[in-house]
Image (spheres, helix red, strand yellow):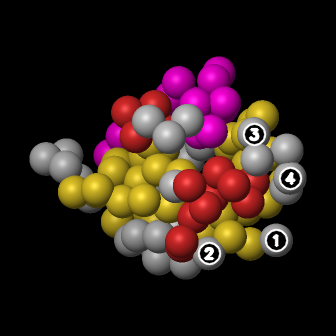
Amino acid sequence: MTAQNNYFWTAATAEGTKVGLNDQGRDDLGEVSFIDLPAVGTVLKTNGKFLSVEAEKAVTDLDSPVSGTIVAVNEKLADQPEDLSSNDQGKNWIVVVK
């Protein structure tokens, strides 16, 4: 199962484009139990490999909704992957891309 870009929200910030899991992504995946976060400096391409997640309803690779270089990663998700299940964009953001 490969998720489409409609699994993510994006928001323009002073640092770059912030990317997080949206309602549809949360609904389709269920509670996330593990996320393999990309590293700062990783170059993303739209529809290219972004990250892997293990969740209640699926274990899957998710494609990137944006192109650019990752300038920040929400490191809390490594220890608290359940934050992806939150609808709070302050908690469920994954990366910032420039």
- The residues bearing labels 2 and 4 have C-alpha atoms spaced at a distance of 16 Å
How far is the residue under mark 3 from the one under mark 1? Answer: 16 Å
Q: Secondary structure at mark 4?
A: loop
Range shown magenta: 69-85
Kindly identify which residue carries mark 4: 57
Mark 3 to mark 4: distance in Å? 8 Å
Which residue is depicted at the point 85% across and 44% down?
56
- The residue singled out by tag 2 in the image is 4
Q: Is residue 65 left or right of residue 25?
A: left
Q: Is residue 67 magenta?
A: no
Residue 83 in the image: above or below residue 70: above
Amino acid type at circle 1 is Met
Nearest-to-viewer mark from 3 and 1: 3
Q: Earlier in the sequence, mark 2 or mark 3?
A: 2
Callout 3, which amino acid? Answer: Glu
State whether residue 10 is above or below residue 32: below
Callout 2, which amino acid?
Gln
Residue 24 pos. (x, y %): 61, 61
Quarter of the rendering occupied by the C terminus: bottom left
Marks 2 & 4, CB-CB < 8 Å contact? no
Q: Amino acid at mark 4?
A: Lys
Relative to 81, 65 lies left or right: left
The answer to the question of whether label 3 and label 4 lie on touching residues, with beta carbons closer than 8 A, is: no
Which residue, given by chain and number where applicable, does mark 1 sit on?
1
Task: From the image, state whether disc 1 or disc 4 is nearer to you.
Answer: 4
Judging by the rendered image, the residue that carries numbered circle 3 is 31
Q: Are marks 3 and 1 in contact (CB under 8 Å)?
A: no
